[in-house]
Image: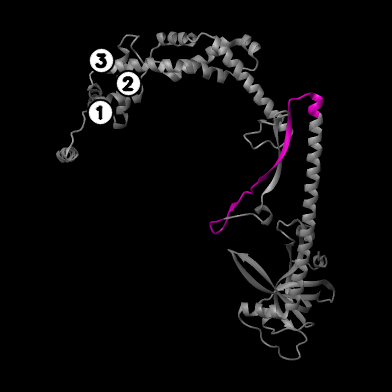
Amino acid sequence: MRKNFQAVGSEHRHTFTATFERTGYKTTELRSKTYYQPTILVNNVMDQAGSLLTDHLWFNYTLGFQKLGHLKKGDRLQFDGRISTYTKGYLGRDTFLSEKHPVATDYKIERPTKIKLLNASEPRVPLPKENWDLVQLIMKENEAFYKARDEQAEQERFEREQEKQEEIEAEIKAEKAQEAAALAAEEVAVKTEGRSYRFVPFTVYIEPEPRFGYYGEYDYYDDYDSEPYPVTRYKIVEVTSETALDDNRGKGYHSGAEALRIYQKHLRRDKTIKLTRDWLNKQPKDQMWEWIQTERTKNPMLTSQELRSMMYPRVAEYMGDSLTDKVGDVLLDGFFAAWWGQTGTLLNQSLEKRRQAFLESQPKELPATWRREAIDKGVPQDQWRQYMLDALTQHIQTLPLTQQFPVNDRFLRRWQKMSKKPKRRRKHKRRKNAELSEKNVD
């Protein structure tokens, strides 16, 4: 950090002197394009009193510097500027570069003006006016520097890759040793505990998650994410036959503890299902049907969903704590669904018989009569169907209790469809069919 700049302050502009070292350039990536910006490096930056503030400083190669012409190493420059702060360091994802160039706050001189060349003894060669031509000139003058810098960067990158490869090989070796030790410990545990199953580790390779690129194509986050990475998982197999007992449909589990937990959960689930099914088979199949008929006698207009919600607490009360003590961890939802499935079909069949008998005994044009009544009474069009459903409900409630049934929109549509007359086919269609039949006869 350039701490000497703190004493100068940033409230006012000051005059500084510096020695020209060389030119350079920096790049900026914007919308998949690379933009080049010329820069200039100066050394031994001093204030008006001649005190050294910093050993080097970078500026953008602005027009104020370009007007001086082609500078030479060692030229003394004078300019005015203001002290300000900026953030420096590596902001990428490379851990090596992040440690080498940590993010920090430093001081700089911004917006230099009144730029002068102090030791100008002869006129300087003017610089190119176009930005790209100036960048090309800078690249040519510093060709040896950039070449040496690129070679050094490439050597450092190669060394880092070698270190990473060695670390990866060491990790793989350690993982294999750990897997071998875990397998040996598992074999010992099987013999000691007398188990009929054991855990077998295996490796799967996970494909990286791609992201959607700028040009509408899939791309990866970086070069390291573009390759599948290995993950160790476990499956449960029998000791004698080596057959898999439970391995998450061939995908396995991340750890042996997880595999054991899931396996035991499946064993408890299978046991519960078997005990619940055995207990259900011993119960009278018409028990729930008696409960349903009792409720329908009180209110025949109950729907299947309403009866189901009424049967759930009745079944829970019927099971009681005694069943839980006998069976164990009984799942009430699964048990109720299995028992309701035996009576739900019978309930739907009885309701269908009542609906069919009702339709056969009623005039087909009755829904049209209710619709005309709604129109005559000035009922809005979006409320016609509700008016017809209410009229249908009142009409069914006049029947004996043994013939009543819940009403829904689907039944009303079915009644309306039966009342419609079939459309007559056009003459040319009948003539065409007759011609086709004559051709078939010939």
The CA distance from mark 2 to mark 1 is 16 Å
The CA distance from mark 2 to mark 3 is 20 Å
At x 81%, y 50%, the residue is 170
Which numbered tag is attached to residue 390? 2
Are the residues flagged by discs 2 and 3 in contact, CB closer than 8 Å?
no
Residue 67 placement (x, y as % from top left): 67, 83
Q: Is residue 12 visible?
A: no
User: What is the crowding at mark 2: few (fewer than 14 residues within 10 Å), some, or many (at least 20)?
Assistant: few
User: What is the crowding at mark 3: few (fewer than 14 residues within 10 Å), some, or many (at least 20)?
Assistant: few
**Quarter location, residue 202:** top right
Residue 107 placement (x, y as % from top left): 76, 65
Q: Which of marks 2 and 1 is nearer the N terminus?
A: 1
Q: For the residue labelled by badge 3, is the local secondary structure a helix, a strand or a loop? A: helix
Q: Earlier in the sequence, mark 1 or mark 3?
A: 3
**Quarter location, residue 96:** bottom right
Q: Residue furthest right?
A: 51
Which numbered tag is attached to residue 378? 1
The CA distance from mark 1 to mark 3 is 30 Å
Query: Which amino acid, by three-letter code, is at mark 1?
Result: Gly
